[in-house]
Amino acid sequence: MSIVFRAAASTDIKWEGELHGSIMKGKGKFIFPNGDVYEGDFEDDRPDGEGEYRFANGTIYKGQFSKGKMQGKGTFEFRELPH
């Protein structure tokens, strides 16, 4: 199931994944208006479990989340800047 939430006329927040009632739960992908993307496990509308957070600037965090926060084991990958 894919659902697009529109918070404002010019702002789109996109959710692609499992829903239980109206709650994001299970596997999914959440795309933020600023270009950040979280893909992984959700519980109670928040990242929870294993996932990957790709920041719009190219930085990537892969690892554990708890109640919407990066918590537990994980790694960051930073984009190399040109010299």
Image: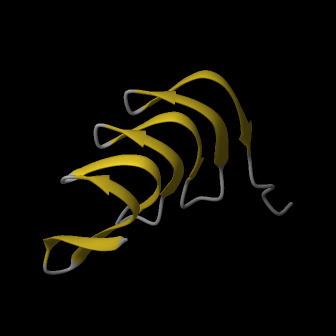
**The image quarter in which residue 45 lies:** top left
Give the farthest residue toward the bottom.
9
Question: How many numbered marks appear?
Answer: 0
Q: Is residue 77 above or below residue 18?
A: above
Q: Residue at x 13, y 80 (%)?
A: 9
Residue under the point 20% across and 80% down = 10
Picture coordinates of residue 60, whole percent (x, y):
66, 48
x, y percentage for residue 11? 23, 73
Q: Which residue occupies the extreme front position in the image?
A: 20
Q: Could you say which is closer to the camera, residue 82 or residue 48?
A: 48
Q: Residue at x 37, y 27 (%)?
A: 67
Residue 69 as seen in the image, left or right of residue 73: left
Left or right side of 64 for 78? right
On the rendered image, what quadrant is the N terminus found in? bottom left
- Above or below, 17 against 43 in this view is below
Which of these two is toward me, 50 or 7? 50
Q: Position of residue 68 (x, y in %)?
A: 39, 33
Above or below, 44 against 27 in this view is above
Taking the view exactly as shown, the residue that stands out farthest to the left is 8
Q: How is the image coloured?
A: secondary structure
Q: Is residue 76 left or right of residue 15?
A: right
Residue 23: image location, x then y, percent? 24, 48
Q: Nearer the viewer, residue 82 or 23?
A: 23
> Which residue is at the far right?
83
Q: In the picture, which quadrant includes the C terminus?
A: bottom right
> In the depicted view, which residue is nearer to us: 15 or 62?
15
Q: Quadrant of residue 47?
A: top left
- Identify the residue at horizontal 18%, vertical 54% (top origin): 22
